[in-house]
Image (cartoon, grey):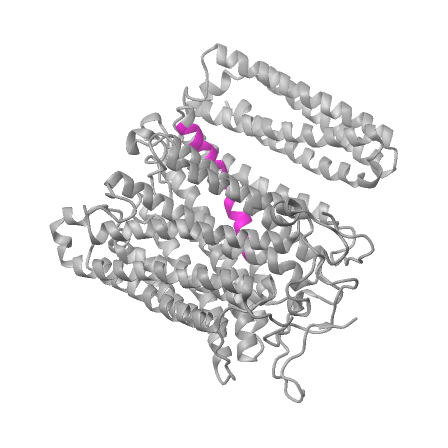
């Protein structure tokens, strides 16, 4: 049950810092710590095992680079969607969000193709610690992409039903999260693909 | 309901988004889990005192069952009793009432947070019924014990244990997010930061500490899950893995976690002390500063749990130093509490008795912590019952004395009724006596060299000299557990049939006491309260009354 109509509520935060915005930043900060622990563990292992370069070279660098570009463009469209929502151009916002989702799905498709070739070559999470880290980190990242697709999809559904207006601020908040998911990839890509 | 809503049973009591109902749900969950945790404590103490004799209501506690029971005991008491009782219950019930909000910033997220913890508890309970039984690698889940079923024979129990931890961690993180946002954005008019009661500050310190510590462990939980399910070797030396990594990631969280459980008790104790000593909190800003220092230091002490675990000895000294330094901010806070007792017109009501019990017992836990912080002493003591006595002397006062203080103090606000005094006072006295009688002998046994984590002491002839002490401690522990039935009886009976309580039975200043008991949905009726002063205007010279509520009638 939501708050009753007719009852006043107080706002005490700094101007412009809505509960949603503060909440998303706290969420992102906790995610940074989660990925920090993961990346820190990987880096410690990686420093102790220079020979992992050999396995790193077997990753599909072309596909990884292509995926980086896809994620960049998807983030670009998400920013356009936030800007459009802010200026009340909700139809444009919806269009840009659909592009974002399309590119995110493409990212997952490329990732699935990479996984498939790797599994085909017999490389799986149990074939050594490099592969364990590779599948764990890219897997958790892929789940974040899925979460993003769901969140942006919900906003698109609202836009299609014409109910995005009152909650249009959420486009920018989801955009913040989406940028974070991209930044995680910006760390993942060199750690896994480029440190050879 | 008060504002003319009609709520069905399900939306009012089960899938409620009202912060007060969610707070009570967390309280009830922690009580239910404490019964489960108490039962495991009974089995542990039975086996240590009467090895190889079947325990009544269970049967023979074999070594493999003993390992599972120890693991369950720690996990339940920390994550499904301590966290709900000290972080979730007071944060949910009190934060909106104390800052003058109608509810949490995100009520539905709040509901999700309860059901996540609840599901975690169910998963843990489910692990009793899977092949191989529950996890048996200790509550710290040390790798490689927890990383492969080769060692303990448990696979699915570990998987369920890890999933239940993951759910509890996500729940507490979402809760912490909610508490922080609520305090920043939902304070009533006039409720400036320097007018927040200590309880709110300390619940925030607890939430922030949890938040900053738990991320790496969530990552480690995924890694350990993969070790168990996908045959990876993150923590298995045989596969090139590094068991010390789990230990570091666990204690990087695990040590701050004890402060996550300690801060709320400090905050609530300070507020209770102010009310029953009729004095302001001594050194409000000093306490806040100390808390900040303690939060920061809590992230650089973790390896003192690992002096014996193969830690590079060169690292032992810095971690010894930080460990001893962190006792300074906490000592400042505890001494502020003692300063409030001095020359005060103390009213020895039940919540204050709990706080005094907390102060007396925690002191012993804190001081023995300084012994253990020194690596040289720790190498000898770490594997012994001395450590068991030490951490029960810190955690039992924090979780149970602090938790009971909160439940006794806010009971009239929660249920609009009073607890029975006679039963309550007997409960307090017996709990205090039995707790000390249980754990004091364990210091002696530990210094004498008796090693913890063994199922059957009779197997080691050198421990025979401690048999008498162990039986004494176990009988005290059984009495301690039995004593809690007084509380259960009092709690249920008083919540249903106790004498009606006023809105403000203690003449307390903080905002929650200006709402009705129990507060209606939305807490404040039509108009929000307006705050005109700080929370601790007690016995102000020159004033007619010895108190001044924070809220003025609008």
Q: Residue furthest front?
A: B497
Q: Position of residue B535 (x, y in %)?
A: 64, 72
Q: At x 60% / y 58%, what residue is drawn?
A: B93
Q: Residue furthest left?
A: B461
Q: Is residue B210 magenta?
A: yes
In the rendered image, is residue B87 in sight? yes
Q: At x 50% / y 35%, what residue is drawn?
A: A38
Q: Is residue A39 left or right of residue B376?
A: right
Quarter of the image with the N terminus of chain B is: bottom right
Camera-nearest residue between B539 and A33: B539
Q: At x 15% / y 49%, what residue is drawn?
A: B458
Residue stretch in magenta? B206-228
Q: Tell me the quarter of the picture where residue B357 sits.
A: bottom left
Q: Is residue B50 magenta?
A: no
In the rendered image, is residue A49 in sight? no
Vertical placement of A165 versus B184: above or below?
above
Q: Position of residue B250 (x, y in %)?
A: 42, 43
Vertical placement of B413 versus B151: above or below?
below
Q: Position of residue B444 (x, y in %)?
A: 23, 63
Quarter of the image with the C terminus of chain B is: bottom right
Main secondary structure of the magenta stretch:
helix
Camera-nearest residue between B88 and B251: B88
Vertical placement of A84 versus A54: above or below?
below
Q: At x 40% / y 36%, what residue is drawn?
A: B127
Q: Is residue B481 left or right of residue B447?
A: right
Number of numbered discs: 0
Q: Position of residue B468 (x, y in %)?
A: 17, 60
Camera-nearest residue between B420 and B163: B420
């Amino acid at each position: 049950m939501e708050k009753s109509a007719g009852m006043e509520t107080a706002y005490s935060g700094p101007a412009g810092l809505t509960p949603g915005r503060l909440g998303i930043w706290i969420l992102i900060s906790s995610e940074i710590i989660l990925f920090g622990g993961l990346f820190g563990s990987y880096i410690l292992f990686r420093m102790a095992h220079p020979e992992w370069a050999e396995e790193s070279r077997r990753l599909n660098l072309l596909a990884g680079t292509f995926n980086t570009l896809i994620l960049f463009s998807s983030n670009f469209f998400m920013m356009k969607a936030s800007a459009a929502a802010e200026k009340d151009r909700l139809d444009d916002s919806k269009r840009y969000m659909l592009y974002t989702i399309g590119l995110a799905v493409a990212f997952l498709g490329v990732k699935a193709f990479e996984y498939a070739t790797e599994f085909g070559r017999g490389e799986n999470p149990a074939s050594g610690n490099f592969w364990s880290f590779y599948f764990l980190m890219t897997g958790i990242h892929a789940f974040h992409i899925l979460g993003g697709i769901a969140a942006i999809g919900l906003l698109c559904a609202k836009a299609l039903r014409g109910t995005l207006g009152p909650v249009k601020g959420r486009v920018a908040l989801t955009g913040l999260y989406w940028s974070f998911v991209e930044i995680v990839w910006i760390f993942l890509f060199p750690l896994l693909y480029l440190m050879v | 309901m008060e504002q003319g809503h009609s709520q069905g049973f399900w939306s009012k009591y089960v899938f409620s988004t009202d912060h007060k109902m969610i707070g009570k749900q967390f309280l009830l969950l922690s009580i239910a889990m404490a019964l489960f945790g108490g039962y495991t404590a009974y089995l542990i103490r039975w086996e240590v005192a009467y090895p190889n004799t079947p325990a009544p209501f269970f049967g023979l506690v074999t070594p493999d069952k003993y390992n599972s029971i120890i693991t369950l005991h720690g996990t339940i008491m920390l994550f499904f009793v301590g966290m709900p009782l000290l972080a979730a219950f007071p944060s949910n019930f009190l934060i909106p009432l104390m800052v003058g909000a109608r509810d949490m910033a995100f009520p539905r997220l709040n509901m999700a947070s309860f059901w996540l913890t609840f599901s975690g508890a169910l998963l843990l309970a489910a692990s009793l019924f899977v092949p191989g039984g529950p996890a048996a690698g200790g509550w710290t889940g040390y790798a490689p014990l927890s990383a492969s079923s080769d060692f303990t024979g448990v696979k699915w129990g570990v998987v369920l244990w890890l999933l239940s931890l993951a759910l509890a961690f996500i729940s507490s993180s979402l809760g912490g997010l909610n508490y922080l946002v609520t305090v920043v954005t939902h304070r009533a008019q006039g409720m400036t930061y320097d007018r927040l009661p200590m309880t709110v500050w300390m619940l925030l310190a607890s939430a922030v500490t949890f938040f900053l510590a738990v991320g790496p462990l969530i990552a480690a939980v995924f890694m350990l899950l993969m070790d168990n399910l996908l045959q990876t070797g993150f923590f298995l030396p045989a596969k090139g893995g590094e068991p010390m990594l789990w230990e570091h990631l666990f204690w990087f969280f695990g040590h701050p976690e004890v402060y996550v459980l300690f801060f709320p008790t400090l905050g609530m104790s300070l507020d209770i002390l102010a009310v029953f000593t009729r004095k302001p909190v001594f050194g409000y800003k000093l306490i806040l500063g100390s808390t900040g220092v303690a939060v920061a230091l809590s992230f650089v002490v973790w390896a003192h749990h690992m002096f014996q675990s193969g830690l590079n000895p060169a690292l032992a000294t810095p971690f010894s130093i930080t460990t001893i330094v962190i006792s300074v901010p906490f000592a400042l806070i505890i001494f502020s509490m003692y300063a409030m007792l001095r020359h005060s017109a103390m009213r020895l009501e039940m919540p204050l008795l709990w706080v005094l019990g907390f102060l007396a017992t925690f002191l012993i836990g804190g001081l023995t912590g300084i012994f253990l912080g020194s690596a040289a002493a720790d190498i000898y003591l770490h594997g012994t019952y001395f450590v068991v006595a030490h951490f029960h002397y810190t955690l039992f006062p924090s979780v149970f004395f602090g938790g009971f203080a909160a439940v006794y103090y806010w009971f009239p606000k929660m249920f609009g009724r009073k607890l029975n005094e006679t039963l309550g006072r007997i409960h307090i006295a017996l709990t205090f006596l039995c707790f000390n009688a249980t754990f004091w002998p364990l210091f002696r046994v530990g210094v004498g060299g008796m090693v913890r984590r063994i199922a059957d002491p009779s197997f080691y002839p050198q421990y025979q000299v401690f048999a008498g002490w162990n039986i004494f401690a176990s009988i005290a522990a059984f009495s301690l557990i039995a004593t809690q039935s007084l509380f259960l009886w009092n709690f249920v009976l008083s919540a249903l049939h106790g004498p009606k309580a006023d809105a403000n039975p203690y003449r307390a200043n903080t905002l929650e006491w200006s709402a009705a008991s129990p507060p209606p949905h939305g807490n404040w009726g039509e108009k929000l309260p307006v705050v005109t002063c700080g929370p601790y205007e007690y016995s102000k010279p020159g004033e007619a009354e010895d108190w001044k509520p924070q809220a003025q009638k609008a």
